[in-house]
Image (cartoon, rainbow, N blue to C red):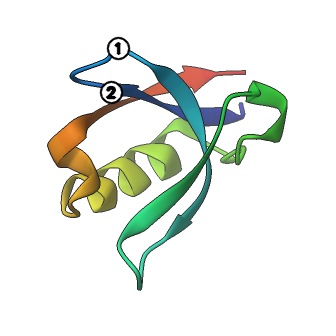
Amino acid sequence: MNAVIRWTNKFSNETGYVKEFRKKEGYFINTFDINNAKAYASESTAKGIITLLKNTDEAINNEFDIISL
């Protein structure tokens, strides 16, 4: 099962998907097209990325959830 990570801005309610997570820099690159989002091989892998995202400043403005494909 493939999964993607959707982000939702806490203030504007704008949503999109994580295209790439740059761990070293502490941010993600977004896309509004689910077809361009990074597809993770499993939900558990996506959960691990969300955990990393929550440890960055990205979590101040965004909430993250998993969408199964």
* Res 60 → quadrant: top left
Query: What residue sits 30% from the left and 62% below the top?
Result: 52
Name the side, left or right, on which 64 lies relative to 60. right
Out of 62 and 44, give the one closest to the viewer.
62
Identify the amino acid type marked 2.
Answer: Asn
Instruction: Residue at the far front: name it.
Output: 12
Query: Quick check: 7 above or below 13?
Result: below
Quarter of image, res 10: top left
Image quadrant containing the C terminus: top right
Q: Position of residue 37 (x, y in %)?
A: 72, 41
Q: How many marks?
A: 2
Q: Position of residue 68 (x, y in %)?
A: 62, 21
> Where 19 sits versus 5, above or below?
below
Estimate the x, y position of residue 53 in percent, counting from the top left. 32, 56
Q: Which residue is mark 2?
A: 9
Q: Secondary structure at mark 1?
A: loop
What label sits on residue 13 in the rendered view? 1
Dot 2: element = strand
Task: Decide: few, some or many residues near mark 2? Use Cα within 10 Å; few <14, some 14-19, many ≥20.
Answer: some
Residue type at mark 1 is: Asn
At 44% from the left and 19% from the top, the residue drawn is 14
Residue 4 is marked as none
- Label 1 to label 2: alpha-carbon separation: 5 Å
Q: Are the residues at dot 1 and dot 2 in contact (C-beta closer than 8 Å)?
A: yes
Image height of 31 relative to 53, above or below = above
